[in-house]
Image (tube, rainbow, N blue to C red):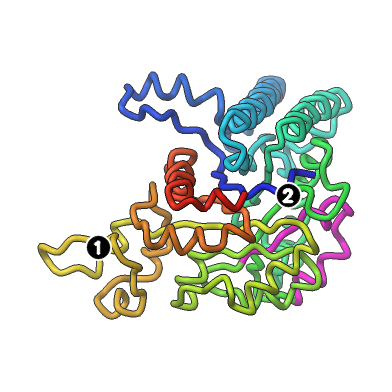
Amino acid sequence: MFDQSLQRIGFCCKYMDPDQTQKPKVLKEIQQNFTERQTTVTWLNRQEKAVAEDRMLDIATHNMQSAYNLIDYVSTLPENRRMVRLGSNQLPAATHENWKHVWQDSTNKKLLEEGFAKVGQLARDKDVRISFHPGQFCVLASDRPDVVERSIEEFEYHADMARMMGFGKQFQDFKINVHISGKKGPQGLIDVLPRLSDVARNTITIENDEMCHGLDASLKLEKHVALVLDLHHHWIRDEEYIQPDDDRVKRVIDSWRGVRPAMHYSYSRDHGLAMALQEGQEIDHTKLQNLPALLEAGAKKQKLRAHSDYYPNEQANAWALSFWKDFDIQCEAKGKNLASEQIYNQAVASSLTNAL
């Protein structure tokens, strides 16, 4: 279990070199050592079986090493920045009917067990809090049985990686976060939980989304799973800046059963905010954005949902940091570690680290 006495600010999935002015080829060469490689089922299906399987193993080997490298990099940051989400595409075609047999082969399973064990041990040794976030097609609360079956398989794929890393042994020693999604809503998720493995049930978290299942829907699961508060999603859906002293926030905290909670923070991209401007006007990042006013002026929620590269609004950042006493903050911005550094630096400048 990670050190819960620390307040953390983390980022998601990829490393960006601080000098982004370098030539793309140079940046790619630097950053590829921390970044997943991928392939497509279409490409695999076009190859000879042996060629495709060799490529899958090559990618998996690279991805386990890149995860190790990413955690190793995060371990060099100030201790309050030692938090990172790992990418979900560690194993190509892991749940695809035509190719999942590759990862069931005993020799390959040994390779994975050894590789992921090193990744997990490094995270524990360096006290880096790590997590996964399965993609949008993991819909455990779907009203379609076939989708539920595929979603369970997808979630268990993530849980098995956590298991190989040595996690999932106790409640929330590792976070695998999904949205409720699906027409069955919270009850559909509750119905699926008994079908999940012990590791999956220990690691699953549910996040409020910005469209169908907001915070109130998530709270129907507070006795069943740990809840992740996504501030941007709540702002988009409920059109309010929820505050740390809100009773709903306390219920989110309580859902973690004593484990330090995690939350998500992102900010709208300029192109979404600019839809509310008149010709010649500029976006005002010096104050909190008024969502009802933005919508009335022509902005669209669909555009405002998109995450910004960085965090230009210090007032919004201060709002997010007002939760830091009780939550670790996962920064969901395109600028990755460079964006999370912005938030950390503002916390330092505001003397919020005195509480550590």
Residue 191 included in the magenta stretch of the image:
yes
Q: Residues within 10 Å of mark 2 (few under 14, many from 20)?
A: some
Q: Residue at x 39, y 70 (%)?
A: 301
Magenta part of the chain: 187-207
Q: For marks 2 and 1, give the one nearer the viewer.
A: 2
Q: Nearer the viewer, residue 211 or 331?
A: 331
Q: Secondary structure at mark 1?
A: loop
Percent position (x, y) of residue 53?
Answer: 71, 25
Instruction: Give residue 185's quadrant in the image.
Output: bottom right
Give the amino acid type for the residue marked by disc 1 in the picture: Asp
Residue 180 visible? The answer is yes
Q: Are marks 2 and 1 in contact (CB under 8 Å)?
A: no
Question: 107 above or below 225?
Answer: above
Q: Nearer the viewer, residue 42 or 117?
A: 117
Q: Residue at x 40, y 67 (%)?
A: 302
Mark identifier at residue 4: 2
Residue 46 visible? The answer is no
> Going by the image, does 206 lie left or right of 306?
right
Q: Nearer the viewer, residue 230 or 135?
A: 230
Q: Residue at x 70, y 74 (%)?
A: 251
Mark identifier at residue 284: 1
Percent position (x, y) of residue 307?
Answer: 42, 55
Q: Residue at x 83, y 55 (%)?
A: 171
Percent position (x, y) of residue 300?
Answer: 34, 71
